[in-house]
Amino acid sequence: MRVPALALLLALVTGSSGCGYHFAPVRAGGAPAGTIAVASLENDSYEFGVERQVADAIQRAFLRRGGLAVVDDPEAADLVVRGSVQPLQTSRRSFSSVRLVLEYEVTLALALEVARRDGTVLSLPGQLLSRTEIYQASADVEVTRKNRREALRRAAEVLADRLHDALLEVVRR
């Protein structure tokens, strides 16, 4: 009887140590520690709809990972994210033996500012706001276009998660 209980206790202690998970900051009663809104981003690139994709990714990151409650009205939020999607950089990454492009890479860069309700702008690290993703080329233009959209979606998700983590660090200070 004592051996299984000891084994269970040992498994719980070992399994929970160093896992990297932590509790998000909350106020009394379990409510998030503040609110955030994503204002309409500007699109300085030629990629249609990428600014909405980035804004949606930022909102999903805060909804999924917690810490700050997402609100629609920037006037009612404790923090407001504003800014723009910079022109996308696309380049060829690898070639076949007959000089056909096999892979491309696309870099998504954001110029964002996060302001408190009183107008104070929070500083964010520069490397936080740029991400390069690789996607496969294809003889079919539609497949290449779909792969590019997926690469941009992945880049937007990574940048949104980075923004989430950085803002929670700033809010905790």
Image (cartoon, rainbow, N blue to C red):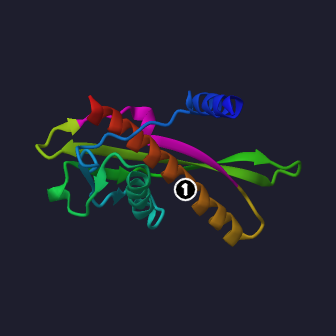
Q: Which residue is drawn at 79% across and 48% down?
A: 95
The question of residue 11 being in magenta is answered with: no
Residue type beneath disc 1: Leu
Q: Is residue 75 above or below residue 111?
A: below
Disc 1 is placed on an element classified as: helix
Which residue is situated farthest in the right direction here? 97
Q: Position of residue 173 (x, y in %)?
A: 26, 28
The part of the image, by quadrant, that contains residue 147 is bottom right
Q: Which of 129 and 71 is in front in this view?
A: 71
Q: Position of residue 104 (x, y in %)?
A: 67, 51
Q: Is residue 71 above or below residue 5?
A: below
The part of the image, by quadrant, that contains residue 19 is top right
Q: In this view, does 54 lie above or below 12?
A: below
Q: Residue at x 44, y 66 (%)?
A: 49
Q: Give the range drawn in magenta.
A: 122-135
Q: Nearer the viewer, residue 114 or 59?
A: 59
Q: Where is residue 30 in the image (x, y as percent from the top left)?
A: 29, 49
Q: Residue 77 vs residue 165: left or right?
A: left
Question: How many residues crowd mark 1 within 10 Å: few (<14), some (14–19), many (20+)?
Answer: many
Q: Which residue is drawn at 29% across and 54% down?
A: 69
Residue on which the image places disc 1: 152
Q: Which residue is drawn at 45% across and 52% down?
A: 87
The image quadrant where one finds the N terminus is: top right
Q: Residue 146 vs residue 160: left or right?
A: right
Q: Residue 67 vs residue 73: left or right?
A: right
